[in-house]
Image (cartoon, rainbow, N blue to C red):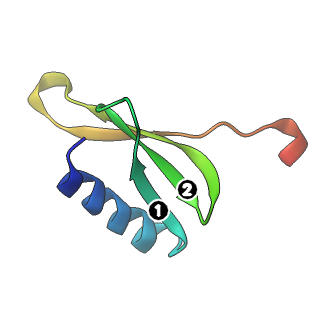
């Protein structure tokens, strides 16, 4: 993901979910970014370029001990 794309996703997550959310580039991957709530890792947002339409998929694992 490019820096401008990460900034847009960061603003979206802050606006829609919570101002403490942040989207950060992944060190060795360019098809996704990491999502955090403060310092806590929440999940990964992936780019989907299928059918010439760009979209994003957010993946977050929820452990049963966290429920």
Identify the residue at horizontal 32%, vertical 57% (top origin): 9
Q: CA distance from mark 1 to mark 2?
A: 5 Å
At label 1, counting other C-alpha atoms closer than 10 Å, the crowd grade (few under 14, some 14-19, many 20 or more) is many
Residue 11 spot, x, y in % from top left: 34, 68
Q: Does residue 65 show up?
A: yes
At label 2, counting other C-alpha atoms closer than 10 Å, the crowd grade (few under 14, some 14-19, many 20 or more) is some
Above or below residue 19? Residue 3 is above
Left or right of 7? Residue 41 is right
In the image, 60 versus 20, the foreground residue is 20
Left or right of 62? Residue 33 is left
CB within 8 Å, label 1 to label 2: yes
Q: Does residue 67 show up?
A: no
In the image, 32 versus 16, the foreground residue is 32
Secondary structure type for disc 2: strand
First along the sequence among labels 1 and 2: 1
Q: Residue furthest left?
A: 52
Secondary structure type for disc 1: strand
Above or below residue 53? Residue 20 is below
Tell me the number on the disc at residue 36.
2
Above or below residue 52? Residue 36 is below
Q: Residue furthest front?
A: 27
Tell me the number on the disc at residue 22.
1
Task: Tell me the quarter of the picture where residue 20 sits.
Answer: bottom right
């Amino acid at each position: 993901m490019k820096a401008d794309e990460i900034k847009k996703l960061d603003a979206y997550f802050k606006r829609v979910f919570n101002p403490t959310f942040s989207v950060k580039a992944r060190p060795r991957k360019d098809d996704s970014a990491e999502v955090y709530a403060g310092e806590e890792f929440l999940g990964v947002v992936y780019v989907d370029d299928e059918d010439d339409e760009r979209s994003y998929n957010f993946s977050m694992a929820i452990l049963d001990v966290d429920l």
